[in-house]
Image: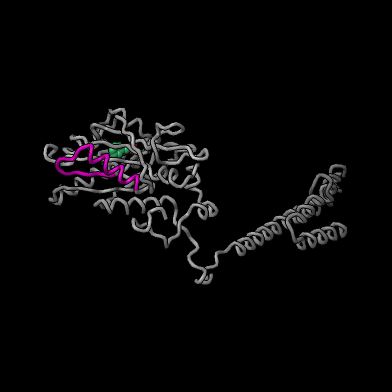
Amino acid sequence: MTEISALKAGLIADIEAADTLDALEGLRVGALGKNGVVTGLLKTLGGMSPEERLEKGPPIQDLRESVTAAIAERKAALEQAALDARLASEKVDMTLPADLGPQGSVHAVSQVMDELAEIFADLGFSVATGPEIEDDWHNFTALNIPETHPARAMHDTFYFPDEEGQKKMLLRTHTSPVQIRTMESFVASGQEPPIRIIAPGRVYRSDSDATHTPMFHQIEGLVIDKGITLGHLKWTLETFLKAFFEREDIVLRLRPSYFPFTEPSVEVDVGYTLTNGQRVIGGDGDAPGGGWLEVLGSGMVNRRVIEACGLDPDEWQGFAFGTGVDRLAMLKYGMNDLRAFFDGDLRWLKHYGFSALDVPTLSGGVGA
Ligand code: PHE
């Protein structure tokens, strides 16, 4: 009996003194493992007579339980200490000296949105916003996409669960509902066009791979006035793309396309040339080694859309366009994996990020 109490005291002292998880695991194997001392004692119970077992069984069982409990307790303490050490070593020091200057950087998406706002402000556009949680009417119906329209299937929409007596809600699949909200607010406040807005923001589609993320960013443009034509659209896009890519040799290719909310609809490609095996925006895409990249969807605002917002389409016309901000950033700054935009990896941000103090201006160059 005293032998077992001595063994127990020794094991527990060792366990309490173990200063690493590895050392503790070594002790556990030595006591409770297949060939451990405690396991060995437990095995002797099988060969004992009932009387002997009655006498020796309880202290052996008690030994096993005490050792198991001591190991568990020590293990929890060591793990807590390891966590505390990690937390202490990883802490953010809020008292870093201010004379180091700002350590953060502006994300490429924010930078490009600022650049776009600056470029379009110069052309007389203001910035409009709308909700990311949108209703079905603004995201689809008012944009001439009725319930049965195949374009709804094209959008891989995230819908919210239906609620009794509530409008059908969704995460907006594009920034085009801001067109509707802007025209509505003009009508509601008794203001007359001209309307010239851009609407940057987050949009959502159930789609995910190297070039698609379920949340991405678009920017919408809308002009409503009298006598607006495709010529105005083309000039505006050309002026914007020249300012954005900071090159005079931007060549656009307009292709007929289809969007329910524009008629006619135009897809816009921009020419690139290969320089050292890299696609560089600029130049005639039809030149040898060149090509075209699709950058925008656009068109003349469909009269049904103008009407749905309460404006008279015989009096007011306009154009609209929409494009992906993430994609524009990738093209301008030579990034190749969209997923890196969302990793928050400091090394990527340091490499591609922009100084918070370097605000894009047309006079200083929008490209930072
Ligand atoms: N909303 C369209 C899209 O997400 C883009 C677009 C906007 C096309 C405005 C035409 C006019 O693909």
Residue 200 shown left or right of residue 67 in the figure = left
Residue 235 % position (x, y):
26, 42
Quarter where residue 13 is shown = bottom right
Residue 145 % position (x, y):
26, 32
Quarter of the image with the C terminus in it: bottom left
Tell whether position 267 is magenta: no
Quarter where residue 238 is shown = top left
Quarter of the image with the N terminus in it: bottom right
Picture colour scheme: one colour
Which range of residues does the magenta coloring cover? 221-242
Residue 115 % position (x, y):
36, 52
178, above or below 353, in the image? above
Which residue occupies the foreground of this view, 1 or 147?
Answer: 147
Tell whether position 241 is magenta: yes
Residue 103 shown left or right of residue 293 in the figure = right
Which residue occupies the foreground of this view, 269 or 30?
Answer: 269
Confirm whether residue 317 shows in the render. Answer: yes
Judged from the image, the quadrant occupied by ligand 1 is top left
Confirm whether residue 133 shows in the render. Answer: no
Which residue occupies the foreground of this view, 111 or 53?
Answer: 111
Residue 28 shown left or right of residue 166 in the figure = right
Residue 199 % position (x, y):
30, 48
